[in-house]
């Protein structure tokens, strides 16, 4: 009986605490690495396109209007805009260009329209072989 009680006294107790010293050491080393390497990182500059005024307005302008409901309308010169489905857009623009693929096509979209809808219109026109596709923008004074 004495042997059993002696063996029972030698049992290790479970440890309820986590040793934080190695964790703190690793964090301090990482902090030093970031502090040393941060000044060496070069920042990249992005050159965004600027909007300028054209010297001369084109004679023949085809405007594709993307409404808030993502429906398309096409407006040729100063005529009244007409609704058109996406699958007939390229055909209608080609017809409005009259065989001259260099006639400019301007895409006007409401600011609430998804970017994806505008890109889809641009992609459709470029796949159809329209060479000059642009976006209509507001001038700085008009946008509030």
Image: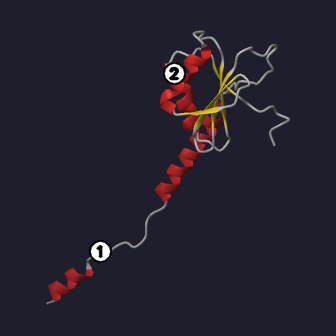
Residue 5 in the figure: left or right of residue 83: left
Image quadrant occupied by the C terminus: top right
Q: Position of residue 97 (x, y in %)?
A: 61, 15
Q: Where is mark 2, residue-wise?
A: 91
Q: Local crowd at mark 2 within 10 Å, few (<14), some, or many (≥20)?
A: few
Q: Position of residue 25 (x, y in %)?
A: 51, 52
Q: Is residue 23 above or below residue 98?
A: below
Say if mark 1 contacts mark 2, CB within 8 Å: no
Q: Identify the image quadrant of residue 38.
A: top right
Residue found 82% across the figure and 33% down from its top: 140
Of callouts 1 and 2, the N-terminal one: 1
Q: Nearer the viewer, residue 71 or 3?
A: 71
Numbered circle sitting on residue 89: none
Q: Secondary structure at mark 1?
A: loop
Q: Position of residue 30 (x, y in %)?
A: 54, 45
Q: Secondary structure at mark 2?
A: helix
Numbered circle sitting on residue 12: 1
> In this rendering, which labeled residue sits more in front, label 1 or label 2?
2
Image quadrant occupied by the N terminus: bottom left
Q: Identify the image quadrant of residue 41.
A: top right
Residue found 48% across the figure and 56% down from its top: 23
| 3D distance between C-alphas at marks 1 and 2 | 84 Å
Q: Position of residue 35 (x, y in %)?
A: 63, 41
Q: Is residue 52 above or below residue 115?
A: above
Residue found 60% across the figure and 12% down from its top: 98
Q: Nearer the viewer, residue 48 or 107?
A: 107
Q: Local crowd at mark 1 within 10 Å, few (<14), some, or many (≥20)?
A: few
Q: Is residue 70 above or below residue 133?
A: below
- Identity of the residue furthest to the right in this view: 141
């Amino acid at each position: 009986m004495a042997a059993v009680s002696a063996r029972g006294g030698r049992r290790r107790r479970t440890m309820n605490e986590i040793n934080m010293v190695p964790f703190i050491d690793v964090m301090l080393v990482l902090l030093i690495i970031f502090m040393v390497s941060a000044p060496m990182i070069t920042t990249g500059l992005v050159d965004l396109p600027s909007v300028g005024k054209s010297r001369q307005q084109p004679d023949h302008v085809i405007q594709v209007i993307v409404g808030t409901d993502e429906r398309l309308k096409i407006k040729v010169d100063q005529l009244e805009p007409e609704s058109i489905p996406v699958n007939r857009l390229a055909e209608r623009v080609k017809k409005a260009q009259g065989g001259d693929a260099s006639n400019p096509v301007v895409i006007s979209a409401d600011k609430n329209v998804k970017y994806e809808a505008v890109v889809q219109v641009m992609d459709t026109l470029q796949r159809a072989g329209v060479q000059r596709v642009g976006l209509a923008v507001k001038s700085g004074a008009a946008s509030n």
